[in-house]
Every structure is written in structure tokens, then in C-alpha cells.
Image: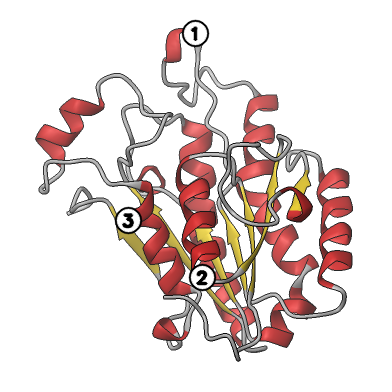
Amino acid sequence: MPTSTNAPRRTMLLTGASRGIGHATVIRFSSAGWRVITCSRHPFPENCPWDAGPEDHVQVDLADHADTTRAISEIRERLEGGELHALVNNAAISPKAAGGARMGTMDTDIDTWSHVFRVNFFAPIMMARGLIEELKAARGSVVNVTSIAGSRVHPFAGAAYATSKAALASLTREMAFDFGRVGVRVNSIAPGEIDTSILSPGTEKIVEEDIPLHRLGTPDEVAKIIYVLCTETSSYVNGAEIHINGGQHV
């Protein structure tokens, strides 16, 4: 629903905005009248449909702690000491072996483990801590995007990705405890098989055998839940992990 013309405009920051769930989330919030600040490794894509996109896009390598710190400072400058109503930590990487094969615990080198955790785990807490004053001012909401792979061995998701998402789920609980004391809610969503460009061959078998609804989820179905977690509808939800997987986890 669009915001009232008399209400102050809300601001959301999203990492990993260039495709899939991130792209759908930006469209969902932008269409509701929010100002959306996006972060990704890539420049702002010219084919994106939301207003003020290039002006509110920050290019950043979240695997680089120094560059992440630089981006946080730039975002704070853009907020001009104002309020940040929502932070959505969506950026993530999931390296594959040759031919797209799953990388397990025995064949993932330590540099890959470190790279994955810097993006998938450390960047979310760096972002939230770095923007805590703006989140406090808005009594805002943080949403961390975890994964069904964080709670079970997945046939396609690698060990580094899966363990980083399990760690992010635990971090969400810790953040909910700490941030909640200053009026900032922290929750997570755990998507299952969502119809995006990064689906692996063989997903059709998972849909048929493991998902009660017998279909993929859509990016917009995920974006709608993220939106709810950032609005008054979920004002007493804190420390939750919402499964969005058509019943795949049961």
C-alpha cells in the first residue's frame, strides 16, 4: 500500500539488490513509497524500474571489511543524520566447484570459507552496528536473509554457504536480544527454492519430492514477507526466523 502523502517518507537499505529476491524487494518497497538505498558489487543496472536508483546506489565489496566500512560512512552521509527504518541484509555468495558441483567440507579451501563468511555473516553485523544510531532514531527493523540450507544439508548449497547461513540465524537471535533493548527489531527469513536465475539443475526433483506445495516460490512472495517484517504489522515480532519454502522444512 502506498504511504500517505502526509506521512514522512521511510527509508530502507538493502544489500544485494541487483537480482532475484533483492530486486523484488526493492520494487516492493519502492512501490509503497519508501526511499530505497541499495548496495551491491555492481554499478546500478540501467533497466531497474524504481525512482532515484542511481542516486541512491552504493557500490561496495562486502567481502572487504575496509570497503564495507567506507560504504557505511557514505550511507550515513546520505541519511544526513536522519532515520533508517529498515535494513535488509540480503547479499550472499555461494561458490560452486567445476561444473556447478557442490563444495563440501573436505574440498572447500580456507580462503573460500573466509570469503563466504565475510559477505554472508560479517557484513550484516557490520552494517547493523555501523548504522545503529539511524536505526534507533527510527525504531527500525533489521531483516537478515538466511536459507533453508542453514538447517539441513542441501544437495546444491555448499558447506561454507550453509554454515554461514546457520551462523547468521544464530546472529539474528543475538542481535534481537541486544538491539531490541534500544527499540530495534531483528528477524530473519529463510527462503527455500525460489524461482531466480541461480537455481541449480535438479531443482525440479526437489520441487516434486520435497515441497508439499509442488512449486517454486517467487521473489515477490519473499519480498512481501520482508515488507511485513519492516512495518507495524510485525511490531511485536523480534528474534524470529520465518520459513518461506512451501513446507519444504516440515
Q: Residues within 10 Å of mark 3 (few under 14, many from 20)?
A: some
Q: Distance from label 3 to label 2 (Cα)?
A: 24 Å
* Residue wearing tag 3: 221
- Secondary structure beneath label 1: helix
Q: Earlier in the sequence, mark 2 or mark 1?
A: 1
222 left or right of 167 in image: left
Q: What residue is at 25 percent from the left and 27 percent from the top?
A: 203
Query: Around disc 1, counting alpha carbons within 10 Å, would you say few (fewer than 14), some (14 to 19), or many (20 or more)?
Result: few
Measured as percent of width and height from the top left, residue 41 is found at: 71, 36
How far apart are labels 2 and 1 at the CA level? 35 Å
Q: Nearer the viewer, mark 1 or mark 3?
A: 3
Front of the two marks 2 and 1: 1
In this picture, is 165 found above or below 204?
A: below
The residue shown at (80%, 80%) is 82
Secondary structure found at label 2: helix
* Label 1 – label 3 distance at C-alpha: 32 Å
Checking the image for residue 189, the label placed there is none
Q: Is residue 44 above or below residue 24?
A: above
Query: Which residue is the site of mark 2?
Result: 173
Q: Position of residue 124 (x, y in %)?
A: 65, 56
Q: Which residue is mark 1?
A: 98
* Label 2 Cα neighbours within 10 Å, binned few <14 / some 14-19 / many ≥20: some
Going by the numbered disc 2, the residue's amino acid type is: Arg
Q: Earlier in the sequence, mark 3 or mark 2?
A: 2
- Mark 3 or 2: in front is 3
Quadrant showing the C terminus: bottom left
